[in-house]
Amino acid sequence: GQQVMQIPQYQHVQEGEDFTTYCNSSTTLSNIQWYKQRPGGHPVFLIQLVKSGEVKKQKRLTFQFGEAKKNSSLHITATQTTDVGTYFCASPGGTYKYIFGTGTRLKVLA
Amino acid sequence: DTGVSQNPRHKITKRGQNVTFRCDPISEHNRLYWYRQTLGQGPEFLTYFQNEAQLEKSRLLSDRFSAERPKGSFSTLEIQRTEQGDSAMYLCASRPSGAQLLNTEAFFGQGTRLTVV
């Protein structure tokens, strides 16, 4: 069945350093979504990518969708303590649902 | 509050007891999902409703789990004869109706944390 692998599982960075998480699928994806979950919170939608090779930016966050639509990345430039949380990618897993990756937990050291 | 609302926020129950959780989606959203999340994992799909119809249910869901959405508005998730392995965060999410089923963001509630002792 549909599987979405996400790496790394954990990442500790010093404040001001960059951070990247990767999402990889064995099959072509129609689209991919990214969510952020703060500690003790619930997932919050960040963005959706649909087109091959698409790049979208939100302030310090840059999202990419691979040319083959089998992988995606989220890059944060100059991390801040407010970036702490777990970042999930999610891809369609059939007609009705999204399958979530295992997430990358980001810790930012001040 | 116009977000997705879940009650209760926390539930501690003894093994073998039944529990029921409620989800109130955003009012104009006809699509409702239940997910389960354990520590260090991503949300795991449980079931999906479109209006009052339950259109998909995870094969991982045992027959102790049942969900309803009787009037196409709020939904309930019941777990019968709870086991310690049922301890998790149960998340509800809703999506607005639209031309494409899977092309809109999901709005999550804050979840119900279940602890089975």
Image: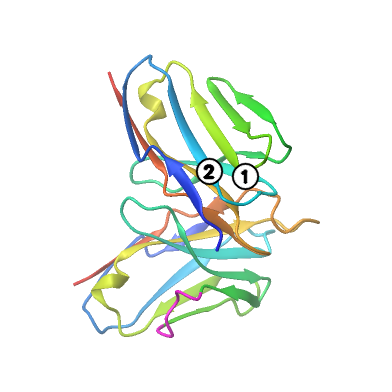
Q: Is residue B73 visible?
A: no
**Mainly helix, strand or loop, the magenta region?**
loop
Estimate the x, y position of residue A21 in percent, counting from the top left.
Answer: 46, 33
Residue depicted at x 43% and y 15% = A78
Residue A43 magenta-highlighted: no
Front one among A52 and A91: A52
Quadrant where the image shows the C terminus of chain A: top left
The amino acid pointed to by label 2 is Asn
| Residue linked to disc 2 | A24
Label 1: few (<14), some (14–19) or many (≥20) C-alpha neighbours in 10 Å: many
**Up/down of B33 relative to B70, above or below:** above
Disc 2 with disc 1 on a shared chain: yes
Residue depicted at x 34% and y 58% = B38
Chain of the residue under the numbered disc 1 shown in the image:
A
Q: Which residues are magenta?
A: B59-64
Element carrying mark 1: strand
Front one among B11 and A83: A83
Residue B62 magenta-highlighted: yes
Element carrying mark 2: strand
Residue depicted at x 60% and y 64% = B32
| Left or right: A12, with B6 as reference point | left
Residue B45 numbered tag: none
| Residue linked to disc 1 | A32
Residue A51, image quadrant:
top right
Quadrant where the image shows the N terminus of chain A: bottom right
Estimate the x, y position of residue B100 in percent, counting from the top left.
Answer: 77, 56
Front one among B37 and A101: A101
Specify how the rendered protein is coloured.
rainbow
| Left or right: B19, with B65 as reference point | left
| Residue projecting furthest to the left | B117
The tag earlier along the polypeptide, 2 or 1, is: 2
The amino acid pointed to by label 1 is Ile
